[in-house]
Amino acid sequence: MQVEAFKVFCNLVESGSFSQAAMQNFITQSAVSQQIRSLESRFNTRLLLRQGRAASPTESGRVLYEGAREILDRFERLDLQLRSLGEEISGTVRIATIYSVGLYEMSRAIKTFLKEYPRVNLHVEYSRANRVYEGCLKAEADIGIVTYPKPRKGIHIIPLPADQLILICATQHPFAKRRQIDLQKLNGQNFVAFERDIPSRRAIDQIFRQHRIKVRIVMELDNIDTIKRSVEIGAGVSIVPLLSVQREVQSGALAQVRFARHTFLRPLGVIVKRNRALSAAARKLIDLLQRSQRD
């Protein structure tokens, strides 16, 4: 039994498409069908239910998929381990991350990493959190980086140092003169928020509920840069990660104010498909991200 046949079968189950499985393995669709017939003959059972161009596993197919996936994951780990012995760190690492983390929190670590490992090619794709999870599960990304990471089936979470959340406002706003502010002072303020389906929005809403704060939502935006621009022109105040506004604070475009009596954090984490074999380069990057010092 060849490992390639298991790979074709797993790709077919995961994509539900003969054409996708063919493209992923650089073979024809008829070759995919032949591989499946060979497996069904070998195990003397029907493995797939075909509905037009789509396919889904039978009960026997699901059992084979779970076992074949374990074999493939173990084989990939062994292959990477043997290849990395005595070799210089190189290759490509595909990263999926949300915009704010990729642009601000990761930038310093990436610069350090590329300086230490110049033969590694980093490919970074910015997406919403749900798309980052999907990309990791479908092996479209080697690692994902998200805020407020939550356990999901098939996902392993590696914690990273958390962000500190701070208040930002226009430099002409009365709050701009303060070094610290009590959270209760936000009652009744115009507030520029993330859209409702973004994890940071849900977390900030939870903070407001816990402390009985009622703000006036004047805008709901999908990225941190647009939020910062809106706060700059005086549309309202907002709560964002500390590292995301350092450039604007230093240039005098925004004012930042820390919270008195409370420290609010935004958890970060690397997500990886469970049992996925990571290259030496990906492991080095994760280690660097974990060791990164935050102000």
Image: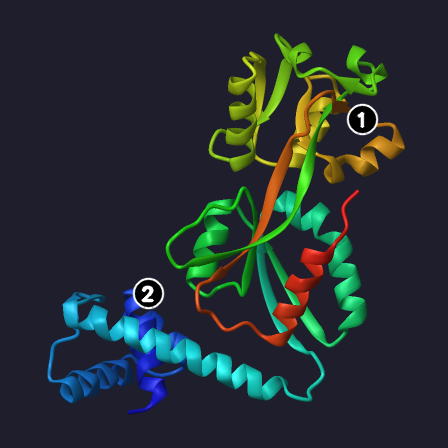
Q: Residues within 10 Å of mark 1 (few under 14, many from 20)?
A: many
Residue at x-position 50% and y-position 30%: 202
Q: Amino acid at mark 1?
A: Leu
Q: Residues within 10 Å of mark 2 (few under 14, many from 20)?
A: some
Reply above or below: 37 against 56: below
Q: Could you say which is closer to the camera, residue 84 or residue 41?
A: 84
Is residue 195 shown to the viewer in this render?
Answer: no
Quadrant of residue 279 in the image?
Answer: bottom right
Residue 23 horizontal side relative to residue 67, left or right: right
Separation of residues labelled 1 and 2 (CA atoms) = 46 Å
Quadrant of residue 285 in the image?
Answer: bottom right
Residue 10: percent from the left, percent from the top?
Answer: 32, 73
The colour scheme used to paint the residues is: rainbow
Q: Could you say which is closer to the camera, residue 257 or residue 138?
A: 257
Q: Residue furthest top?
A: 188
Secondary structure state at the residue bearing disc 1? loop
Is residue 231 shown to the viewer in this render?
Answer: yes
Q: Could you say which is closer to the camera, residue 215 or residue 8?
A: 215
Q: Amino acid at mark 2?
A: Ser
Residue under numbered circle 1? 254
Q: Residue furthest bottom?
A: 1
Q: Could you say which is closer to the camera, residue 212 or residue 115?
A: 212
Q: Give the total of numbered labels.
A: 2
Secondary structure state at the residue bearing disc 2? helix
Residue 284: percent from the left, percent from the top?
Answer: 67, 69
| Label number found at residue 15 | 2
Reply above or below: 32 against 190: below
Reply above or below: 129 against 214: below
Residue 156: percent from the left, percent from the top?
Answer: 47, 58
Quadrant of the drawing holding the C terminus: top right
